[in-house]
Image (tube, grey):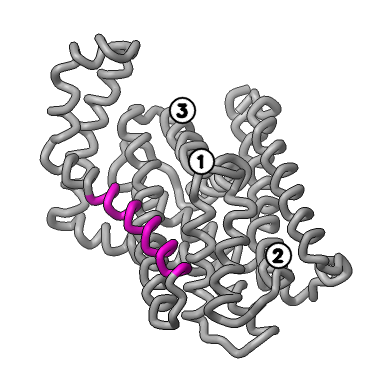
Amino acid sequence: MKKAGELLKRPLAGIIASIGITLLIVTLSRMPLATLLSIPLPLILLSLGLCASRLLAQGLRFHILVRHHSSVRIGLGEAFMVRGVSEFFALTTIPFIADEVVRAWILTDKGEETVTATLIAFAELILDVLVSATMAFIAGVAALTRGEMGVAMVLFTIPASQLALIITLALQTRHHGLERLLSPTGWLRRRIPIGERLLNILRHVGTGSSKFLEALTVGRGKAILAALLAVTVAVMSIPAVTLYIVLSRYTVISFIDALFAFHAGNVLGVLPVTAGGSGLTEAGAYLYSSRILEVDSWEAVVLWRILTYYLTILVTGVMFAYYSQRMVRQKA
């Protein structure tokens, strides 16, 4: 990562934009800054521990995928570092693609084939969406049972679209649909100025993804898939612990309520609109907590984002700086 300075341009712009959105929320809601600047130290330390736990879970998942699908050998410690580096880009750029590209690039830099590295990176994205969309859909059911039709429709529409896309891709992959689609390339070249090299990459992804999916659904692969899903549930639940603690300062709620509120925010935050889902995540969490949980407090939502989003950016930023310097020294 010799061009770390260039790589940091967009993340830094994303951080500035996110801070601007947060300050706008603080201003419009007339939130006292003193409250946000006086977060109890035990709560900060607990949030740091939860942040580390989530990154460890992500590192474990990445390690499992690399161990069973890659020829490259990466220890659990390095998998944790790689996942922290990619998470930094996930939180500071437009959702999707950026962090997956970082992981794929690191794997290819270590000698892995581009197709395999890409499939491993995007497998994590699919697992995240699969679990998160399911939880958001269930949150929509909970909202519907409480008479909040508007909230329910939002939590039905977006997750249903995500799940439908994943299922479609899985079915097409399993039956080599992508390969059949790309086999007659003439019509595509005539309509879209796309190179043969890119088409060949897509064909290889189609072939590789079919084998990749089969490896996760046959024999030992089923146990690996179950482990991956279990770890993903942990990854997509840990931030809700902090939200539960914060909201519990305002009212008596269950962890399940906080989990639903988190996924209500997350389902909006993953829309590719703002860096790290800033503004959208807060809006979703606030909408659910105010309408369903009767916690009408922007202060609680912003406090939660500081303890999860900004704290994680700080931790992963340090990891990025360390890992970049280590790679520079190794190649010197």
| Residue 42 falls left or right of residue 276 | right
Quadrant showing the N terminus: top right
> How many residues crowd mark 2 within 10 Å: few (<14), some (14–19), many (20+)?
many
Where residue 252 sits: x, y (%)?
A: 60, 90
Q: Residue at x 18, y 57 (%)?
A: 220
Magenta highlight: main SS: helix
In 3D space, how far apart are the residues under numbered discs 3 and 2 (Cα atoms)? 38 Å
Amino acid type assigned to the residue bearing label 2 in the image:
Val
Circles 1 and 2: CB distance less than 8 Å?
no
According to the picture, the residue beneath numbered tag 2 turns out to be 302
Which stretch did the figure color magenta?
A: 150-167
Indicate which disc, 1 or 2, sits on the residue closer to the N terminus: 1
Residue 156 sits inside the magenta stretch = yes
Task: Find numbered disc 3 in the image and state the secondary structure of the residue it sits on.
Answer: helix
Q: Type of residue at label 1?
A: Asp
Marks 3 and 2 close (CB-CB < 8 Å):
no
